[in-house]
Image: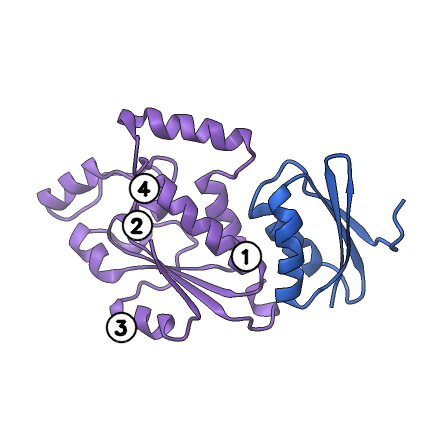
Amino acid sequence: MSEYAVDKTLDARGLSCPMPSVKTALALEKMSLGEVLEVLTDDPVSKKDLPVWAESTGNELLGVKEEDKTIKIYLKKA
Amino acid sequence: MAGQIKNRGSVTLVLFSGEMDKAIAAFVIATAAASMGMTVNIFFTFWGLNVIKKEGGLIKGQNWMQKMLNMMNYGHARKLALSKMNMAGMGPAMMKVMMSKKKVPSLKEFIKTAGELGVKFYPCEMSMSVMGLKKEDFIDECQDVIGAVSYLAIAKDSEVNLFI
């Protein structure tokens, strides 16, 4: 379990640049303000790109965690 | 989608090339920018028109020269060559396998995603008339057929402009 109250999880594992950002955008689009999205990815580029994506779209990056090969990125819709 | 997101700048790409690798580069940038909430326009001109041709159908054109050109240049998104190491079609076939192993979407999937993200596709009117192509010859994602002046009007209001 994560320390954040996750409203939705997006499993983007196996996808490569730019699809994790694209899927994240589409997933957050369907969510309400203040809800938390957990993005699972194994793409090393996304570990750098998704925080940049959050900053440039004005969504809040709550945290980035790594477990084995899975990178978990927590985003709050703003 | 594009309409619901606040304006966060815009990207305008000119896709002049009709090769698979260059088209994929254009669509990677286009879909990434659209995911960031940017307005994305792609102006397809000359060989770039091959990327957005519909699959199938008769050989297009109004005269023998146009028909011959469109026969030899019978493109659509799944049938494009590589700009290097094409090796009579072996290059693209191998590249498709290598890309799908890395879960990189195919060009056709990229085009579909771009459409869903609200990327605007503009075929170039002058190239179309030279090659004898009509709006119906292109995939449904295509919006207005525009000319150089309309492209420039869009480009001068864009922060990012690329010619591919």
x and y percentages locating residue B107 in the rendered image: 44, 41
Q: Earlier in the sequence, mark 1 or mark 3?
A: 1
State the mark number for residue B7.
Answer: none
Residue under pointer 2: B48
Residue under pointer 4: B19
x and y percentages locating residue A17 in the rendered image: 56, 45
* Amino acid type assigned to the residue bearing label 4 in the image: Glu
State the mark number for residue B149.
Answer: 3
Q: Chain letter of disc 3?
A: B
Residue under pointer 1: B117
* Chain A painted colour: blue
Q: Chain letter of disc 2?
A: B
Given residues B36 and B135, the one toward you in this image is: B36
* Amino acid type assigned to the residue bearing label 2 in the image: Gly
Q: How many other residues sit within 10 Å of disc 1, few (<14), some (14-19) or many (≥20)?
A: many
Given residues B99 and A68, the one toward you in this image is: A68
Q: Earlier in the sequence, mark 2 or mark 4?
A: 4
Whether tag 1 and tag 4 are in contact, CB under 8 A, the answer is: no
Q: Earlier in the sequence, mark 3 or mark 2?
A: 2
Q: How many other residues sit within 10 Å of disc 4, few (<14), some (14-19) or many (≥20)?
A: many
